[in-house]
Image: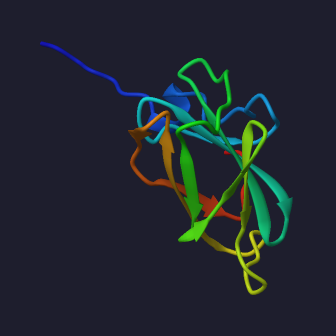
Amino acid sequence: MTITAFASVGLSHGENKPGPHGGFIKMPGAFHTEVVPVSKTQVQVFLLDMDWKNPITDKSSVTANGMICKPKDTTFICDLGKKANIEKKGKLEIKATRLEQKGNSAIYELPLNRH
């Protein structure tokens, strides 16, 4: 008899822990996204390697709820619009490409919190 136990995907990738910039982590592919709240209508998104290091914007792109995010140094700044409020219940969908490697959508439940 074989018994296989699976940890939740979030816990297996450390998504229950703060990222290196204090943000919230998801793994949409061969890289991680880290979302750091800036205000009710703005977030920063870091594209990290498999070890949660080396944030990069070169040959990379991010959209947040369909809004194009702007690269700044090693992060992307995402303005979600005046009507957005990440402190209210909802979803934040991050679509990212890191070093030309496209990931799946990373869905963050709002408001952001650690489980």
Q: Is residue 65 above or below residue 17?
A: below
Q: Residue at x 60, y 28 (%)?
A: 14
Q: Quadrant of the N terminus?
A: top left
Q: How many marks?
A: 0
Instruction: Give x and y (percent) for residue 45.
Output: 69, 48
Q: Residue at x 68, y 30 (%)?
A: 55
Q: Is residue 56 above or below residue 77?
A: above
Q: Is residue 64 above or below residue 61?
A: below
The image quadrant of residue 29 is: top left
Give the side of residue 105 with respect to residue 109, left or right.
Answer: left
Q: Residue at x 79, y 65 (%)?
A: 42
The extreme left residue here reads 1
Instruction: Decide which of 4, 91 is in the foreground and name it.
Output: 91
Give the side of residue 37 with respect to residue 64, left or right.
Answer: right
The extreme right residue here reads 39
Instruction: Give x and y (percent) for residue 50.
Output: 53, 21
Q: Residue at x 54, y 31 (%)?
A: 11
Q: Quadrant of the C terminus?
A: top right
The extreme bottom residue here reads 83
Colouring scheme, one of rainbow, by chain, secondary structure, one colour: rainbow
Instruction: Decide which of 82, 72 is in the foreground and name it.
Output: 72
Can see residue 65?
A: no
Instruction: Give x and y (percent) for residue 79.
Output: 74, 69
The extreme front residue here reads 59
Can see residue 37?
A: yes
Instruction: Decide which of 11, 46 is in the foreground and name it.
Output: 46
The image quadrant of residue 53 is: top right
